[in-house]
Image: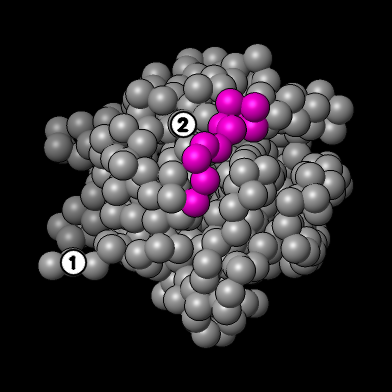
Amino acid sequence: MKIANEYAPSFDTKSNTDFSVEQITDICNNIGPRKPGSPEELKAQKFMQQTLDKISDKTEIEDFTLHRQGFMGFIPFTVCMGVASVFVNWFGKPLIAFIMCILAFVPLILEFLMYKEFDDFLFPKQTSHNLIATRAPLGETKQRILLVGHSDSQFEWPINLLLGGLKAKLLVEVPAVVGLVIQTIFALVCAIVGKGGAAGDITSATWFFKLFFIVSIIFIPFEISFIFFQSWTKSVPGASDNLSGCYVGIGTLKAMREAGVDLNQTEIRVICSGSEEAGLRGAKAYAKAHEKELKDIPTVAIGLDTFRDLEYIAVYDRDLSGTLQHDWGAKYLVKNAAANCGYDLKFESIYIGACDAAAFEQRGIPSTGFAAMDPAPADYYHTRKDNPENLRPEAIEAAIEIMIETVCMYDKEGLPKKD
């Protein structure tokens, strides 16, 4: 039985789903793509604030600084280092070639996989914003739940648009990384045995070094194509990724307000973060600025990210390219709430990438991610196909229903605990 039924006989998830779709369509059509730290990102947040003003006790917009191209701006450097290392190695400088490969991997790992602000200072500065809406409980605030979606949209990934998400991964992304790995091994082997390809004499190269060189050359086109992996100017509509996540949070709060439900001891905060697509910068800024406050009372954060593919609806167990374990209680809170709504959610991992929940988990705030997205990924992922016409309202409605139950369950029972 739903715990939410103890708070109200029913919640109108259908009309709030329709409202969400209308609002998402309005933003996409009248405001447009919202690159991280852009005026359009802020304009969309102010648009959503108009609704949140009516259903919460207070709203605020906080600014923070970022360098949006730092997250992916390393790509030309990494490609150049990897490609050049092959020829540097062949002409007798294997140690230098190996160092070049290591330098190529450093920003790839720290920025793209670990979401560190490693090379951000090299890129222009922008101002981005977080929109926060707060609703207090009836009684004393003893705990808090954060529903976090991001309001920006990613720069377009042309190769995903051309090939589709899975083909792009298999035909470009994976071979590019494999090529760099092979080139690194090639340089290391040459350095260990004391030969740089042909040891300075191409005509005397052994078959082993010739073969390694040829294989390295084969992967160079894949690496060069990686330079065109992302557009540097054009961003996408971002209807599903991630206005749907923002409106799952807004729809949850709105449905509870319309049903006349006030929680007993739990403060709800709906956060529409900025610049998630630039490396979780908005969530990181918020979690850092409010860390003490968030730890003064028990707080749990739910990252809401892309609700379209209901067949893939899941709770995220691991995040930040698989390196971060989410809180046991947080993930079972969502899983148990979903079960009460008739959904058997699987635990999934984000093996490449991250969602906003990771920024809070890193700060010691119990967190988990929640999404309904084809992990392949689908062809709409970070492309112009992520438009209002491609929305699937049933996924948004299911997420709102599950989040209402999650919030009510947390208010009544707190986080689940291991036996």
Residue 37, horizontal then vertical, whole percent: 76, 52
> Which residue in the protein does label 2 denote?
398
Instruction: Name above or below for residue 175 compared with residue 300.
Output: above
Amino acid type, label 1:
Lys
Q: Which one is in front, 261 or 417? A: 261
Q: Are marks 2 and 1 in contact (CB under 8 Å)?
A: no
> Which residue in the protein does label 1 denote?
418
Residue 168, horizontal then vertical, whole percent: 44, 23
Q: Which part of the image, by quadrant, shows the N terminus? A: top left
Q: Is residue 27 left or right of residue 419?
A: right
In the rendered structure, which segment of residues is drawn in magenta?
A: 7-17
Say if residue 213 shows up in the picture: no
Q: Residue at x 28, y 29 (%)?
A: 214
Q: Residue at x 83, y 43 (%)?
A: 47
Instruction: Name above or below for residue 25 compared with residue 71.
Output: above
Say if residue 152 shows up in the picture: yes
Q: Which part of the image, by quadrant, shows the C terminus? A: bottom left
> Does 122 lie within the magenta span?
no
> Does 11 lie within the magenta span?
yes
Amino acid type, label 2:
Ala
